[in-house]
Image: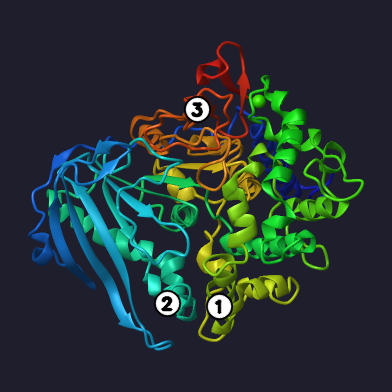
Amino acid sequence: MTIFRAPRAPGLRGMVAALRNAAILAATTVLVSACGGGGDDPFAGPLPQLAQAQPATIVNCASLASGFTFASTSVTAASVVAAGTLTNAGQPVAEHCVVTGKMNQRVSAVDGQTYAIGFEMRMPKDWNGRFLYQANGGTDGAVAPATGGFSGGGPLQNALQQGFAVISSDAGHNGSQNPLFGLDPQARLDYGYQAVATLTPMAKALIKAAYGKAPDRSYIGGSSNGGRHTMVAAARYANDYDGFLATSPGFNLPKAAVAQLYGAQQWAKVATDVNNLESALPQTERKLIANAILARCDSLDGVADGQVQDVEACRGAFDLARDVPTCPGARDGTCLTAAQKAAIGNVFTGARNSKGDALYAHWPFDAGIMQTGWADWKFRNSVGSSRDPVAVAFIFSSPPESASVLSNTLGYALNYNFDTDAPKIFATSGIYSESGMSFMTPPNPAKLDALRGRGAKMLVIQGTSDPVFSVDDTMAWYDALDAQYGGHAANFARFYRVPGMGHSRGGPATDQFDGLTALVNWVEKGQAPDRIVATARGAGNAGGVNTEVPADWAANRTRPLCPYPLVARYKGGDKEQAASFACER
Ligand SMILES: [Ca+2]
């Protein structure tokens, strides 16, 4: 192999050049071999360890209504909330201070509407010294209560109960401005990433005014679109946060929304009633698929327990065409027609344009396909007036579509053109100077040098049966991240798949877990989360029962969530207990 030109004439100059080139070649070889482990590896070394947050007691609350000033900020109210006024999972939330306000109020030159970044901050009397930015879901537009209860299904303790000071916001528009805020370019940017940047320094200053000190440690987390906000913050605002918790993240959200429209068109081909796309694949038939998946894949992790842990092995083991009977005639719930199989195959292979170019990720087959939430996203949100069609039309496309789309979102979804419309999420147009993909997704998502370098940590947790944001898209991100850091991404970022879990929660799954505590222990104590124990919310669960927990599971079944690419494999003992499983290749 020759990678440099041999010196034309031998001599000292030529020999020096040859030696230098040989040295470069040798160094390159060392680097390449080090990626396999050991040696002079630039990413293998220890990372900075951040100190633990220290508790404090609140000093000011009601006085913050008039006594707190910050640029472009107006506080509308500040008051003490007595212990027990709020409860979570049957337990009281302790006394805390709630402050409401807004930032950057302005009148849009585009639509004449008044916009502001509305917020609520809840600060416990007895504070743990930590700040949490609670990033909210959907298309935002609502200040969800700042309690920090977003991690998994029915959290037994929310962040406010754990002592965090929590902020929540509407990300720059109110509910009545949903979804047409997308016509205002600044409202798009606030929703995409700028609300986080605007609110963060204000929130830290408010904490300092309340407790007499700024937060020792700062975290950001959320589910769905909140997980997206978190992934964006990991890339854009790594210096502002020490820990990032993204659950069920809408990583490439505009692409995922386009894929939803693609799915709607596939389902419409086989729906018996186009106004009810679930008629394309009702739960009876989805259970047929789930059972066929379990028959092929359940035992690959060592135990037939209704959960497919070994997602990768299942890709090769399950074949929809082969493993589900094809109807010889009419559909009767025991088979699928060839046309149904083709539609399902198209959806799981991933959205494509007429040239066959992939517009989004593929999806793994998983037993969670039977769950109700899966159908809500695939068959209803994909064509309804509050999610995918309006997000694509008004928020992600440049230029945005006419507001008349609102009156027929089903028609918009079913007539969406994947050759001519889909490119609009990458486009700019006139006053829309940033594309949907630019303002909604992290820049350089696989390059997190600032986060890594300062000792910050990141956890990403997602259901294998997430119907709207493909777990395979998130996996591809993690693969790219791991490649970027020479196979050592796990030193600062970990990704966990929850078999059976749908979008954010639900499904035949152990969907109750405390990702926030796992993250704090990693950031502040150096305890890397080699496994996160998750619980099924069966009968009697204080966080709320998940009716999709199968009847033959223990009501409180536990499983380890394992950092990808590790798999929870059964090692023997009580098959209802996490302790009987090991995280292995
Ligand atoms: Ca299993």
Q: Tell me the distance, in whole angstroms, between the alpha carbons under discs 2 and 3.
A: 41 Å
Q: CA distance from mark 1 to mark 3?
A: 45 Å
| Camera-nearest label, 1 or 2 | 1
The residue singled out by tag 2 in the image is 186
Instruction: Tell me if 266 is positioned left or right of 490 in this view.
Output: right
Q: Characterize the local packing of mark 1: few (<14), some (14-19) or many (20 or more) Cα atoms within 10 angstroms.
A: many
Amino acid on which the number 3 mark rests in the picture: Arg
Q: Residue tagged by mark 1? A: 406
Residue at figure coordinates x 12%, y 46% from the top left? 58
Answer with left or right where residue 465 lies relative to residue 387.
Answer: right
Give the residue at x 68% y 43%: 24
Residue 140 in the image, given as x and y percentages of width and height: 42, 64
Q: Residue at x 58, y 35 (%)?
A: 508
Q: Which residue is mark 3?
A: 531
Helix, strand or loop at label 3? It is loop
**Badge 2 element:** helix
